[in-house]
Amino acid sequence: MPAISRPTSKDVAQEAGVSQSTVSLVLGGKWTGRVSPATARSVRDAAERLGYRPNQAARNLRLGTTRTVLLMVPTLTAPFFGPVYTGAARVAARHGFGVVVSTWPDDAEGPAESPFGSDEAIDGVLASSIAADALGRFRETPAVMLDSGPGGGVPTVDFGVADGMRAIAGHLGALGHRRFGHVAAGVDQWTFRARAEALAGTVAALPGGVLSRDTCAIDVTSAKDAALRLLTAPGPPTVLVCDDDLIAAGAYKAARALGLDVPGDLSITGFDDVLLATALEPELTTVRLPAEELGAQGMTALLDLLAGERPEPRVLPGELVVRESTAPPGEGGDKGRRV
């Protein structure tokens, strides 16, 4: 049986309608100022269509690059960041790059340090859900910020979290809720500040709308304690709006501890739509954020940056997913809400 031949740089050149030297310049990352951005994109697209894969080991030695991207995240335990990595790695692999992951916790002091001992060991950085100033010594390395908000002089790919929170509050307002409790993540990140501002603005616009807030760590026990404080205060809320699906799980435990039915006595919402949202009973009303697409779009933007282009800011919309954890306010009033 004859061997299946792999596409060559000559095949890519023919597919794109350019010379082999142009293919070498583009795929070698040395085309800026010598080849137009449109031609560079045409070559990369042709290589992807043909499934062309250069000999990376030889190429890396020749070009002095590592074909490695660092993905920085606050934690590896949150289920949200797995799909972000999956999306980034999928796009990276198509272009001959690898992705390694490092954590930079929210409470860490000072800028991030390279886990490799030298910044030259990576070609670019994707930083998810951290502040731009945490890039520290990576400031000279091509970088794209994910879910970190506009500004900072770095290309960004963000979620439309404010619109997502407005969708949740609008849904609850239409059901008749006016007393809102916000179980807020006690993390100083753009994404949570944006959620809080959007919720406050939407509730304030509702006739008779009242908002109370308590903060917690993003874990079930802390969230339960925060929810209990809200539910046992005077004039308790008829709905708990949670910044995260894991926080919502803590709110469920608080409701159960007080003998409250969800959603008969208390509605609860989450955010992110991770797998936990459908494991809860009743299943959780939440906002679905396309985490895998965030990683994919971020990697695409970083590849454009490495190719000499300047990516425009991108915003990925969320989607309100209405499930069984929300209903009109129950007639039970404050039943069971004080201990």
Image (tube, rainbow, N blue to C red):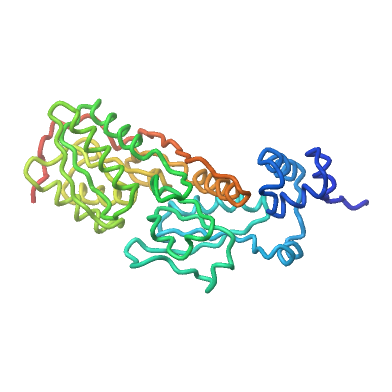
Q: Is residue 335 visible?
A: yes
Answer above or below: position of 274 versus 163: below
Q: Is residue 7 visible?
A: no
Front-most of residues 249 and 149 = 149
Q: Does 321 sit above or below residue 101? A: above
Q: Is residue 160 left or right of residue 180?
A: right
Q: Determine the residue positioned at 93% across, 51% down.
A: 2
| Vertical relation: 43 (above or below) 88 | above
Residue occupying the point 34% across, 61% down: 106
Q: Is residue 302 left or right of residue 132?
A: right
Seen from the viewer's position, the closer of residues 103 and 306 is: 306
Q: Position of residue 86 (x, y in %)?
A: 55, 52
* Residue at the bottom extreme, as displayed: 117
Name of the residue lying farthest toward the front: 33
The extreme left residue here reads 234
| Residue 17 location, quadrant | top right
Total marks drawn? 0
Q: Is residue 21 left or right of residue 284?
A: right
- Give the residue displayed 39% in from the left and 47% down from the top: 151
Left or right, 51 with respect to 252, comes to right
Residue 179: image location, x then y, percent: 15, 35
Quadrant location of residue 328?
A: top left
Q: Position of residue 310 (x, y in %)?
A: 55, 44
Where residue 231 sits in the image (x, y, percent)? 14, 46
Q: Residue at x 51, y 58 (%)?
A: 71
